[in-house]
Image: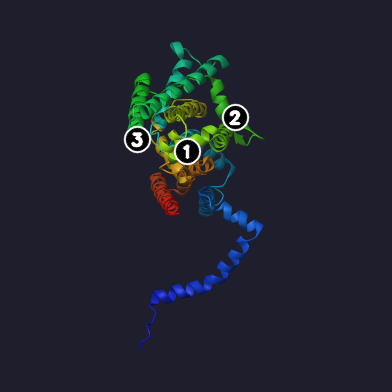
Amino acid sequence: MTTVQPTRAQSIRRAIGTRLSPVAARWNSFAKTRAGAIVVRMFSTNAAWILLLLAVLMLLFNYLAPGKFLTEFNVRTMAANVSVLLVIAVGETFVMATGGIDLSVGYVLLFSGVTSAQVMNWGGRDSTNYGWDIVLLGFVVALGSGFAWGVLNGVIVAKAKVPALIATLGTLGMSWGLAEILSNGQDLRYLPSIIGDMGASRLFFDKIPFVVIVAAIVAVFGSVILSLTRFGRYTLAIGSNQEAARRAGINVDRHLIKVYAMSGTLAGFAAFMNLAIFTTTTISGHANDNLQAIAAVVIGGTSLVGGVATIAGTTIGICIPMVLFSGFTILGFQSFWRDVAVGAVLILAVYTDQLRRRRRERR
């Protein structure tokens, strides 16, 4: 009787298994302890792995550009730039948690910023010395503009039954075109100096930009609403199974309108933050805001089919494109490499989500 000789690949696998078996045994022993159970539970979430990826990227860029990447100035600049995107990404998380998508947020932000700036420049006079009354009026207009677009999106999706992809693609074009018409394609400047002062101010020993703190507060409130309130439970229930949610007594159409209205309102809020940071409408600077927000939400662990979402993951996910952009810029690479890297991470995140969903279905 002849014996079957193992192939080279099988021999290599056995050798690797023999070497790693002691490590696996130690890990299993550690996982049974209290500290090990906490670590296992923590890394069973997508957010923990994304946080690990973010830390690795930051350490890598700091190693490749010592003394240039993890500096106080660069970290503060990255945080300020990401704050606007984080606010719209929080709203996008709620929309995608229902199984929908909002492609319009970037240009709703632009439209809201244009209308707010025009109100504060009413009459064509120099508005730099205007007081808090005009600033508050501009803030309300920004929120109201975003809210109106959000409600329109919600009505089209919930009542007219137009797919969210098509509905928000349509309002993307409408909000973009109207913003260009209202502004004649020109950036609006000469805003009240109070706004610029807010955007440039820093708190906590003059270290943390005010806009970063505002964005963090929005993220915390979003996380509380999604995790601990009826609104959040209804949002996730609709994303898990819309028909089952309807039979459970949830008014699905009304809730979807609320979710899209929330997304639009946060886009309006982000528009006012953008005015504070740049003191202008930055008309040409929002072409990729919607895609960056969607990428951050997906990278952060929110399922494309709804029912699973986390604001913590979105917060970490929104930092990855900014870290890549800053790192590549410091190293002298063209900014296009950032888009390549973000695209690759996005595909990997979607693939991971698909694997996780198939694993749940097998159970």
To which residue does mark 2 refer? 201
Q: Is the residue 291 above or below the residue 363 in the image?
A: above
Q: CA distance from mark 3 to mark 1?
A: 20 Å
Query: Could you classify mark 2 by the number of other residues whose Cα lies within 10 Å: few (under 14), some (14-19), or many (20 or more)?
Result: some
To which residue does mark 3 refer? 165
Q: Earlier in the sequence, mark 2 or mark 3?
A: 3
Residue 305 position, x and y percent, is 40, 42
Can residue 328 be seen here? The reply is yes
For the point 41% across and 31% down, the residue is 106
For label 1, the SS is helix
For label 3, the SS is helix
Q: Residue furthest bottom?
A: 1
Tag shown at residue 237 = 1
Query: Could you classify mark 3 by the number of other residues whose Cα lies within 10 Å: few (under 14), some (14-19), or many (20 or more)?
Result: some
For the point 48% across and 75% down, the residue is 15
Residue 272 position, x and y percent, is 50, 25
> Disc 3 vs disc 1: which is toward the camera?
1
Q: Is the residue 132 above or below the residue 360 in the image?
A: above
Count of numbered labels shown in the rendering: 3
User: Which amino acid type corresponds to the residue marked 2 in the rendered image?
Assistant: Ser
